[in-house]
Image (spheres, rainbow, N blue to C red):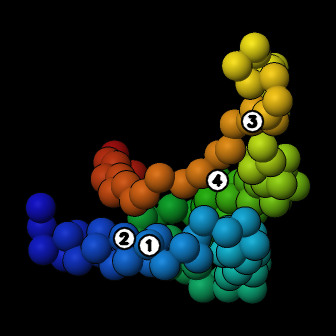
Amino acid sequence: MNPDKKFLVELQRQYFNSGSPTELKHRKKALQTLRKILTTDVDELLEAIEADLRRQKGVSHAFEIANAIVEINYYLENLDEWAAPTYVEKTLTSALDTPMIIKESKGVVLLIGPWNYPA
């Protein structure tokens, strides 16, 4: 793995192991911070996209900025429900328990995707 990528993955792993990103309030705060950046720095972001990709600002705003804000709002509205435990049916062996599925973060993933715009 490229040393820069390896460093970034290790940095993210250390952050994950701190326990902070697994807490729902920290996830919400990160989303709110991202939304704030997208709304307050929109002109600067659009200028950068236009310079890098030669894409019109209106197109970039619709496909990059506005779409991301809609998604962030959707996540913030639903995160509590998605993170809540799911109670499951009791069986003979769990009759005295409260069986549930608890959603937990498991670790760090490095995603490397293609970027081919403009073609």
Count how many numbered circles sit on residues in the image: 4
Within-10-Å neighbours for mark 3: few <14, some 14–19, many 20+: few
Choose the circle earlier in sequence order: 1 or 4.
Answer: 1
Within-10-Å neighbours for mark 2: few <14, some 14–19, many 20+: some
Q: Which residue is mark 4?
A: 63
Please say if 80 is above or below 17: above
Residues at marks 3 and 1, CA–CA distance in whole angstroms? 24 Å
Q: Which residue is mark 2?
A: 13
Please say if 53 is above or below 32: above
Front residue (pair 91, 18): 91
Choose the circle earlier in sequence order: 3 or 1.
Answer: 1
Residue at screen point 45% across, 66% down: 54
Image coords of residue 74 (percent x, y) = 81, 52
Amino acid on which disc 4 is placed: Phe
Residue at screen point 12% across, 67% down: 2
Image coords of residue 13 (percent x, y) = 36, 70
Tell us which disc is closer to us: 2 or 1: 1
* Helix, strand or loop at mark 2: helix
Q: Which residue is mark 3?
A: 100
Residue 24 appears anywhere in the view: yes
Amino acid on which disc 1 is placed: Asn
Q: Residue furthest top?
A: 92
Q: Which residue is mark 1?
A: 17
Amino acid on which disc 2 is placed: Arg
Q: Relative to 7, is 83 on the left or the right?
A: right
Residues at marks 4 and 3, CA–CA distance in whole angstroms? 39 Å
Tell us which disc is closer to us: 1 or 4: 1
